[in-house]
Amino acid sequence: MNPLALSLILTTLLAGTLITMMSSHWLTAWMGLEMNMLTMIPILMKTTNPRSTEAATKYFMTQAMASMMLMMALTINLMYSGQWSITKMTNPVASNMALMALMTKLGSAPFHFWVPEVTQGVELAPGMILLTWQKLAPLSLLYQMATYTNTSLIYLSGLLSILIGGWGGLNQTQLRKILAYSSISHMGWMLIILPFNPTLTLLNLAIYITLTLSIFMILANTFTTSMSSLTLMWNKTPAMTIMLMATLLSLGGLPPLSGFMPKWLMIHELTKNNSIIMPLTMAIMTLLNMYFYMRLIYYSSLTILPSTNNMKMTWQFTNTKYTMTLPTLIILSNMLLPLTPMISMLE
């Protein structure tokens, strides 16, 4: 892609997200979401092939439907209340429609079907943007809507997301699909805690983005997209393999790694609000995610898949990938747990 066009597209993507995040008016927030969606399509089609075209088409159709539903919700709200404020939506039909539209944009269950397909159809870099940056704008709107949203709908979607995110990833062999299902599961955690403590949703989002960026950068650096190529990582880049193992364990929420912190604080917050069954159910369903993370660790370090080629070493090319930010991301992904008391004071 032309560098000038790419810089223009990325600037518009950044501007769209910032407009939505800074808006208190529904129309400007909707405009920011549209800018976000339209600039994401050329990013998904950065390398033109039938799979990326199909992925971009699926993304466009789903997001356009969600945008249309959101605009209809805003129109209904305007008819009943006569104002466009995000923090006040009095009509329950409009509120539920807006919530479902934003859930579709986030890719949380039961509106999750597009996420694995689109992520698998594109390259690692666009997939990384799709699973990290594209969550910011819809979640910032949900953060502002937290006081009046339908909690039953949020709990149902959150529990379904954790279950489907764990169940769907069990039989996958493609790493992008596994990370997409992992994203769906994390969205479930963020949604469930939203009515109780929206600040914890933002903390979980920040740590999830850090972990996902780290994993995508390691996979891009080692040119790994499937489990069969993952088995050659140990011979090729042992240091990267150890980093990947630690980051995957952190993504699963194991102590003493950073990923344990949001889950710990969320379970604490839910039990503090006399909700015992829900955090127990969430923790049990998250074990499904833990299983496929452990499977990735096993494949990357302890086994070699059968292949027609007897050579276990891959050809060593000079690596031209940019890895300056990777050490910082790995440290943030694995060593933030001691800061938990300070972070819990900031809530």
Image (cartoon, grey):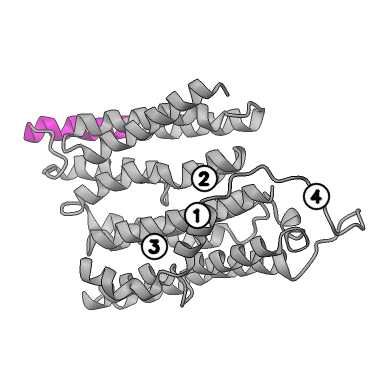
What residue did someone put label 1 on?
212
Q: Kindly report which numbered mark, 2 or 3, lies closer to the viewer in this rendering.
A: 2
Instruction: Give the position of the N terminus as an image quadrant.
Output: top right
The Cα–Cα distance between marks 3 and 4, rounded to whole angstroms, is 45 Å
Q: Earlier in the sequence, mark 3 or mark 1?
A: 3
Q: Which mark is residue 316?
A: 4
Could you tell me which residue is drawn at 21 percent across and 29 percent down? 27
Q: Earlier in the sequence, mark 1 or mark 2?
A: 2
Residue 208 is situated, as x and y percent measured from the top left of the image, at 43, 58
Q: Is residue 302 above or below residue 210?
A: below
What amino acid type should be assigned to the residue bearing mark 1? Answer: Thr
Q: Please tell me how many numbered marks the rendered image carries.
A: 4
Q: Amino acid at mark 2?
A: Met
Work out whether residue 153 or residue 252 is closer to the camera in this orientation and state it: 252
The mark nearer the N terminus, 2 or 3, is 2
Amino acid type shown at disc 3: Leu
Q: CA distance from mark 1 to mark 4?
A: 26 Å
Magenta part of the chain:
68-82
Query: Could you tell whether 44 is left or right of 275 in the image?
Result: right
Would you say the residues marked 1 and 2 are in contact, meaning their CB atoms lie under 8 Å apart?
yes
Asked if one can make out residue 315 in the rendered structure from this viewpoint, the answer is yes
**Regarding mark 2 in the picture, which secondary structure is present there?**
helix
Relative placement, left or right, of 109 versus 79 is right
Task: Name the disc covering residue 159, or none.
Answer: 3
Residue 107 relative to residue 140: left or right: right
> Which percent across, then down, holds residue 40?
46, 31
